Image (tube, rainbow, N blue to C red):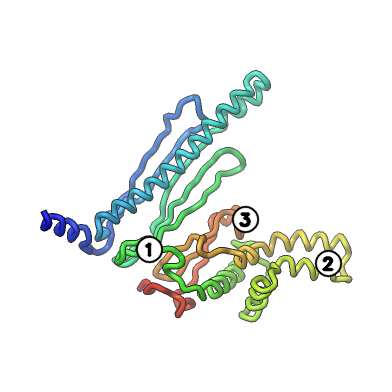
Protein backbone atom coordinates (compact mmCIF):
# COMPACT_ATOMS: atom_id res chain seq x y z
CA UNK A 1 0.00 0.00 0.00
CA UNK A 2 2.79 2.41 0.93
CA UNK A 3 4.56 1.54 -2.33
CA UNK A 4 1.37 2.35 -4.31
CA UNK A 5 1.01 5.75 -2.63
CA UNK A 6 4.65 6.62 -3.33
CA UNK A 7 4.25 5.51 -6.94
CA UNK A 8 1.17 7.73 -7.41
CA UNK A 9 2.97 10.71 -5.91
CA UNK A 10 5.94 10.08 -8.18
CA UNK A 11 3.79 9.79 -11.29
CA UNK A 12 1.97 12.97 -10.31
CA UNK A 13 5.15 15.03 -10.40
CA UNK A 14 7.02 13.74 -13.45
CA UNK A 15 8.20 16.63 -15.62
CA UNK A 16 7.15 15.84 -19.18
CA UNK A 17 8.36 18.92 -21.06
CA UNK A 18 6.30 21.47 -23.00
CA UNK A 19 2.60 21.45 -22.00
CA UNK A 20 -0.03 20.33 -24.48
CA UNK A 21 -3.06 22.56 -25.03
CA UNK A 22 -6.45 21.51 -26.31
CA UNK A 23 -9.55 23.70 -26.71
CA UNK A 24 -12.77 22.93 -24.89
CA UNK A 25 -15.73 24.45 -26.76
CA UNK A 26 -19.26 24.62 -25.35
CA UNK A 27 -22.02 26.38 -27.31
CA UNK A 28 -25.60 26.95 -26.18
CA UNK A 29 -28.18 28.68 -28.38
CA UNK A 30 -31.42 26.94 -27.44
CA UNK A 31 -32.55 29.34 -24.73
CA UNK A 32 -36.29 29.55 -24.08
CA UNK A 33 -38.71 32.48 -24.16
CA UNK A 34 -38.30 33.23 -20.46
CA UNK A 35 -34.94 34.90 -21.06
CA UNK A 36 -33.28 37.54 -23.22
CA UNK A 37 -30.34 35.20 -23.74
CA UNK A 38 -29.59 34.31 -27.36
CA UNK A 39 -26.26 32.52 -27.23
CA UNK A 40 -23.37 31.60 -24.98
CA UNK A 41 -20.00 30.29 -26.13
CA UNK A 42 -17.13 28.92 -24.08
CA UNK A 43 -13.76 28.39 -25.78
CA UNK A 44 -11.18 27.71 -23.11
CA UNK A 45 -7.83 25.91 -22.93
CA UNK A 46 -7.53 22.45 -21.48
CA UNK A 47 -3.98 21.70 -20.40
CA UNK A 48 -2.18 18.38 -20.48
CA UNK A 49 1.36 17.26 -19.78
CA UNK A 50 2.02 19.96 -17.15
CA UNK A 51 4.20 17.58 -15.19
CA UNK A 52 1.93 17.30 -12.16
CA UNK A 53 -1.44 15.65 -12.67
CA UNK A 54 -2.98 17.11 -9.50
CA UNK A 55 -2.00 20.67 -10.36
CA UNK A 56 -3.12 20.09 -13.95
CA UNK A 57 -6.58 18.99 -12.78
CA UNK A 58 -6.83 21.97 -10.43
CA UNK A 59 -5.85 24.50 -13.11
CA UNK A 60 -8.28 23.06 -15.67
CA UNK A 61 -11.02 23.07 -13.05
CA UNK A 62 -10.36 26.71 -12.13
CA UNK A 63 -10.43 27.87 -15.75
CA UNK A 64 -13.65 26.00 -16.51
CA UNK A 65 -15.27 27.20 -13.29
CA UNK A 66 -14.45 30.86 -14.08
CA UNK A 67 -15.95 30.53 -17.56
CA UNK A 68 -19.13 28.84 -16.36
CA UNK A 69 -19.64 31.35 -13.55
CA UNK A 70 -19.45 34.23 -16.03
CA UNK A 71 -21.97 32.59 -18.36
CA UNK A 72 -24.27 31.85 -15.42
CA UNK A 73 -24.08 35.49 -14.31
CA UNK A 74 -25.12 36.78 -17.76
CA UNK A 75 -27.87 34.14 -17.98
CA UNK A 76 -29.32 35.31 -14.67
CA UNK A 77 -29.09 38.91 -15.86
CA UNK A 78 -30.96 37.94 -19.04
CA UNK A 79 -33.74 36.20 -17.10
CA UNK A 80 -34.20 39.22 -14.84
CA UNK A 81 -34.30 41.51 -17.89
CA UNK A 82 -37.03 39.36 -19.47
CA UNK A 83 -39.14 39.68 -16.32
CA UNK A 84 -38.76 43.46 -16.35
CA UNK A 85 -39.68 43.69 -20.04
CA UNK A 86 -42.79 41.58 -19.45
CA UNK A 87 -44.10 44.34 -17.18
CA UNK A 88 -44.28 46.63 -20.23
CA UNK A 89 -46.70 44.36 -22.07
CA UNK A 90 -49.84 46.08 -20.83
CA UNK A 91 -48.28 49.54 -20.54
CA UNK A 92 -46.57 50.20 -23.87
CA UNK A 93 -46.92 47.52 -26.53
CA UNK A 94 -44.51 49.13 -29.00
CA UNK A 95 -41.81 49.52 -26.38
CA UNK A 96 -42.49 45.97 -25.23
CA UNK A 97 -42.00 44.56 -28.74
CA UNK A 98 -38.90 46.68 -29.33
CA UNK A 99 -37.29 45.42 -26.12
CA UNK A 100 -38.04 41.81 -27.04
CA UNK A 101 -35.77 42.21 -30.07
CA UNK A 102 -32.78 42.71 -27.79
CA UNK A 103 -30.78 39.53 -27.26
CA UNK A 104 -27.97 38.92 -24.79
CA UNK A 105 -24.73 37.20 -25.80
CA UNK A 106 -21.92 35.88 -23.60
CA UNK A 107 -18.59 34.59 -24.87
CA UNK A 108 -15.54 33.34 -22.99
CA UNK A 109 -12.42 32.80 -25.08
CA UNK A 110 -8.69 32.63 -24.50
CA UNK A 111 -5.28 33.56 -25.80
CA UNK A 112 -2.02 31.76 -25.02
CA UNK A 113 0.75 34.34 -24.71
CA UNK A 114 3.72 32.25 -23.60
CA UNK A 115 4.42 28.58 -23.05
CA UNK A 116 7.62 26.76 -22.16
CA UNK A 117 8.75 24.02 -19.80
CA UNK A 118 9.11 26.72 -17.11
CA UNK A 119 6.22 29.18 -17.54
CA UNK A 120 2.72 29.27 -18.96
CA UNK A 121 0.90 32.58 -19.46
CA UNK A 122 -2.56 33.01 -20.91
CA UNK A 123 -5.63 35.24 -20.88
CA UNK A 124 -9.31 34.52 -20.44
CA UNK A 125 -11.51 37.10 -22.17
CA UNK A 126 -15.08 37.66 -20.98
CA UNK A 127 -17.33 39.29 -23.57
CA UNK A 128 -20.95 40.26 -23.04
CA UNK A 129 -23.53 42.07 -25.10
CA UNK A 130 -26.54 43.22 -23.10
CA UNK A 131 -27.72 46.11 -25.24
CA UNK A 132 -26.33 49.45 -26.28
CA UNK A 133 -23.96 50.48 -29.05
CA UNK A 134 -21.49 47.67 -28.42
CA UNK A 135 -20.57 44.85 -26.10
CA UNK A 136 -17.94 44.92 -23.37
CA UNK A 137 -14.90 42.72 -22.88
CA UNK A 138 -12.85 42.19 -19.75
CA UNK A 139 -9.97 39.84 -19.11
CA UNK A 140 -8.25 37.74 -16.48
CA UNK A 141 -4.61 36.72 -16.74
CA UNK A 142 -2.94 33.51 -15.59
CA UNK A 143 0.80 33.12 -15.03
CA UNK A 144 1.81 29.60 -14.09
CA UNK A 145 5.12 28.44 -12.62
CA UNK A 146 5.50 24.92 -14.02
CA UNK A 147 8.53 24.12 -11.87
CA UNK A 148 6.95 24.87 -8.50
CA UNK A 149 3.36 24.27 -9.69
CA UNK A 150 1.76 27.50 -8.57
CA UNK A 151 -0.18 30.42 -9.97
CA UNK A 152 2.07 33.47 -9.78
CA UNK A 153 0.81 36.64 -8.14
CA UNK A 154 2.39 40.06 -8.59
CA UNK A 155 4.20 39.79 -5.25
CA UNK A 156 5.60 36.38 -6.27
CA UNK A 157 7.24 37.93 -9.32
CA UNK A 158 8.34 41.40 -8.20
CA UNK A 159 10.08 42.97 -5.23
CA UNK A 160 8.42 46.03 -3.58
CA UNK A 161 10.82 48.46 -5.28
CA UNK A 162 9.59 47.29 -8.69
CA UNK A 163 6.44 49.42 -8.48
CA UNK A 164 8.14 52.72 -9.28
CA UNK A 165 10.12 51.28 -12.18
CA UNK A 166 7.09 49.55 -13.68
CA UNK A 167 4.95 52.69 -13.48
CA UNK A 168 7.69 54.78 -15.08
CA UNK A 169 8.04 52.34 -17.96
CA UNK A 170 4.26 52.14 -18.40
CA UNK A 171 4.03 55.91 -18.79
CA UNK A 172 7.05 55.98 -21.08
CA UNK A 173 5.38 53.40 -23.33
CA UNK A 174 2.08 55.32 -23.34
CA UNK A 175 3.77 58.58 -24.32
CA UNK A 176 5.51 56.74 -27.17
CA UNK A 177 2.18 55.23 -28.33
CA UNK A 178 -0.33 58.09 -27.87
CA UNK A 179 -2.78 56.69 -30.42
CA UNK A 180 -3.99 54.07 -27.92
CA UNK A 181 -4.07 56.03 -24.66
CA UNK A 182 -5.54 59.11 -22.98
CA UNK A 183 -2.15 60.74 -22.75
CA UNK A 184 -1.02 64.36 -23.28
CA UNK A 185 1.92 65.35 -25.45
CA UNK A 186 4.77 65.64 -22.97
CA UNK A 187 8.54 65.44 -23.15
CA UNK A 188 8.88 62.30 -21.09
CA UNK A 189 12.08 61.96 -19.09
CA UNK A 190 13.24 60.48 -15.81
CA UNK A 191 13.04 63.97 -14.30
CA UNK A 192 9.45 64.43 -15.48
CA UNK A 193 8.43 61.10 -13.96
CA UNK A 194 10.24 61.76 -10.67
CA UNK A 195 8.35 65.04 -10.28
CA UNK A 196 4.85 63.69 -10.93
CA UNK A 197 5.54 60.50 -8.94
CA UNK A 198 6.79 62.50 -5.95
CA UNK A 199 3.86 64.92 -6.14
CA UNK A 200 1.41 62.04 -6.02
CA UNK A 201 3.21 59.92 -3.41
CA UNK A 202 4.24 62.71 -1.05
CA UNK A 203 1.66 65.44 -1.58
CA UNK A 204 -1.25 63.40 -2.93
CA UNK A 205 -1.65 65.64 -5.99
CA UNK A 206 -2.62 64.10 -9.31
CA UNK A 207 -1.05 65.20 -12.57
CA UNK A 208 -4.41 66.39 -13.90
CA UNK A 209 -5.08 68.49 -10.80
CA UNK A 210 -1.71 70.19 -11.19
CA UNK A 211 -2.30 71.03 -14.84
CA UNK A 212 -5.82 72.32 -14.18
CA UNK A 213 -4.50 74.52 -11.39
CA UNK A 214 -1.95 76.03 -13.78
CA UNK A 215 -4.70 76.78 -16.31
CA UNK A 216 -6.87 78.45 -13.66
CA UNK A 217 -3.99 80.72 -12.65
CA UNK A 218 -3.06 81.66 -16.23
CA UNK A 219 -4.20 85.28 -16.57
CA UNK A 220 -3.55 85.30 -20.32
CA UNK A 221 -6.48 82.92 -20.93
CA UNK A 222 -10.13 83.88 -21.19
CA UNK A 223 -12.69 82.08 -19.04
CA UNK A 224 -14.02 80.28 -22.11
CA UNK A 225 -10.52 79.06 -23.04
CA UNK A 226 -9.94 77.92 -19.48
CA UNK A 227 -13.13 75.86 -19.47
CA UNK A 228 -12.19 74.27 -22.79
CA UNK A 229 -8.64 73.43 -21.66
CA UNK A 230 -9.84 72.02 -18.34
CA UNK A 231 -12.25 69.73 -20.20
CA UNK A 232 -9.48 68.55 -22.52
CA UNK A 233 -7.04 68.03 -19.64
CA UNK A 234 -9.57 66.01 -17.65
CA UNK A 235 -9.73 63.52 -20.50
CA UNK A 236 -6.26 63.59 -22.04
CA UNK A 237 -4.34 63.25 -18.77
CA UNK A 238 -6.45 60.52 -17.19
CA UNK A 239 -4.06 57.70 -18.17
CA UNK A 240 -1.24 59.31 -16.19
CA UNK A 241 -3.36 59.49 -13.04
CA UNK A 242 -4.63 55.94 -13.53
CA UNK A 243 -1.05 54.66 -13.66
CA UNK A 244 0.11 56.70 -10.66
CA UNK A 245 -2.81 55.55 -8.49
CA UNK A 246 -2.83 51.95 -9.67
CA UNK A 247 -2.49 49.04 -7.25
CA UNK A 248 -0.21 46.82 -9.32
CA UNK A 249 -0.93 43.79 -7.14
CA UNK A 250 -4.43 43.78 -8.67
CA UNK A 251 -3.41 44.67 -12.22
CA UNK A 252 -3.58 41.86 -14.83
CA UNK A 253 -0.12 41.04 -16.14
CA UNK A 254 1.57 38.46 -18.34
CA UNK A 255 4.99 36.87 -18.37
CA UNK A 256 6.27 36.58 -21.95
CA UNK A 257 9.60 35.95 -23.63
CA UNK A 258 9.86 39.60 -24.69
CA UNK A 259 9.04 41.06 -21.29
CA UNK A 260 6.32 41.97 -18.83
CA UNK A 261 2.92 42.84 -20.30
CA UNK A 262 0.49 45.00 -18.32
CA UNK A 263 -3.18 44.80 -19.38
CA UNK A 264 -5.91 47.44 -19.05
CA UNK A 265 -9.67 47.20 -19.39
CA UNK A 266 -11.79 49.26 -21.85
CA UNK A 267 -11.90 52.99 -21.04
CA UNK A 268 -9.32 52.70 -18.22
CA UNK A 269 -6.51 54.44 -20.08
CA UNK A 270 -7.87 54.90 -23.60
CA UNK A 271 -10.99 55.08 -25.78
CA UNK A 272 -13.19 52.06 -26.50
CA UNK A 273 -11.61 51.62 -29.94
CA UNK A 274 -8.31 50.84 -28.20
CA UNK A 275 -9.86 47.62 -26.92
CA UNK A 276 -7.93 46.19 -23.98
CA UNK A 277 -4.67 48.15 -24.26
CA UNK A 278 -1.44 46.56 -23.14
CA UNK A 279 2.02 47.81 -22.30
CA UNK A 280 5.21 45.84 -22.92
CA UNK A 281 8.18 46.35 -20.60
CA UNK A 282 11.39 44.53 -21.63
CA UNK A 283 12.92 42.38 -18.90
CA UNK A 284 16.17 44.35 -19.07
CA UNK A 285 14.30 47.33 -17.58
CA UNK A 286 13.41 45.23 -14.53
CA UNK A 287 16.81 43.86 -13.58
CA UNK A 288 17.29 43.68 -9.83
CA UNK A 289 13.60 43.88 -8.91
CA UNK A 290 12.51 40.38 -9.96
CA UNK A 291 11.88 37.42 -7.65
CA UNK A 292 11.80 34.86 -10.47
CA UNK A 293 14.06 33.85 -13.34
CA UNK A 294 13.39 35.75 -16.55
CA UNK A 295 12.04 33.63 -19.45
CA UNK A 296 14.62 32.84 -22.11
The mark lying in front, picked from 3 and 2, is: 2
The image shows residue 97 at horizontal and vertical percentages of: 61, 24
Judging depth in this view, the residue of 10 and 106 nearest the camera is: 10
Q: For the C terminus, give its image quadrant.
A: bottom left
Q: What residue sits 54% from the left and 41% below the top?
A: 129
Element carrying mark 1:
strand
Chain-order first, disc 3 or disc 1: 1
The image shows residue 23 at horizontal and vertical percentages of: 33, 48
Farthest top residue in view: 90
Chain-order first, disc 2 or disc 1: 1
Q: What residue sits 34% from the left and 63% below the top?
A: 115
Q: What residue sits 53% from the left and 65% below the top?
A: 248
C-alpha gap between disc 3 and disc 2: 27 Å
Is the residue 31 above or below the residue 245 in the image?
Answer: above
For label 1, the residue is 114
The mark lying in front, picked from 2 and 1, is: 2
Element carrying mark 2:
helix
Q: Are marks 3 and 2 in contact (CB under 8 Å)?
A: no
Horizontal side, residue 248 vs residue 153: left or right: right
Is the residue 42 above or below the residue 91 in the image?
Answer: below
For label 2, count other residues whose C-alpha is less than 10 Å away and answer few (under 14), some (14-19) or many (20+).
some
Is the residue 185 above or below the residue 272 in the image?
Answer: below
Count how many numbered circles sit on residues in the image: 3
Horizontal side, residue 176 vs residue 38: left or right: right
**Mark seen at residue 271:** 3
Is the residue 96 above or below the residue 237 in the image?
Answer: above
C-alpha gap between disc 2 and disc 1: 48 Å
Chain-order first, disc 3 or disc 2: 2
Element carrying mark 3:
loop
For label 2, the residue is 216
For label 1, count other residues whose C-alpha is less than 10 Å away and answer few (under 14), some (14-19) or many (20+).
some
C-alpha gap between disc 3 and disc 1: 27 Å
Amino acid sequence: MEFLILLLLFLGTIVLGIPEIEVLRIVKNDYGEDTMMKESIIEIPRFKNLGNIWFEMLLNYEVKKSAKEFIAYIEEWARDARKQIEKLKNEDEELYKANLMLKYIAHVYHEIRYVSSRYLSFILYYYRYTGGAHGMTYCETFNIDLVNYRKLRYEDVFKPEAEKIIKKEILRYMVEHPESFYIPKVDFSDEFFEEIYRNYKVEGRSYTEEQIEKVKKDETLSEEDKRMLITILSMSSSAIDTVLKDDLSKRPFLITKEGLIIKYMPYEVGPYVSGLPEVLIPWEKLKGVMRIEVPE
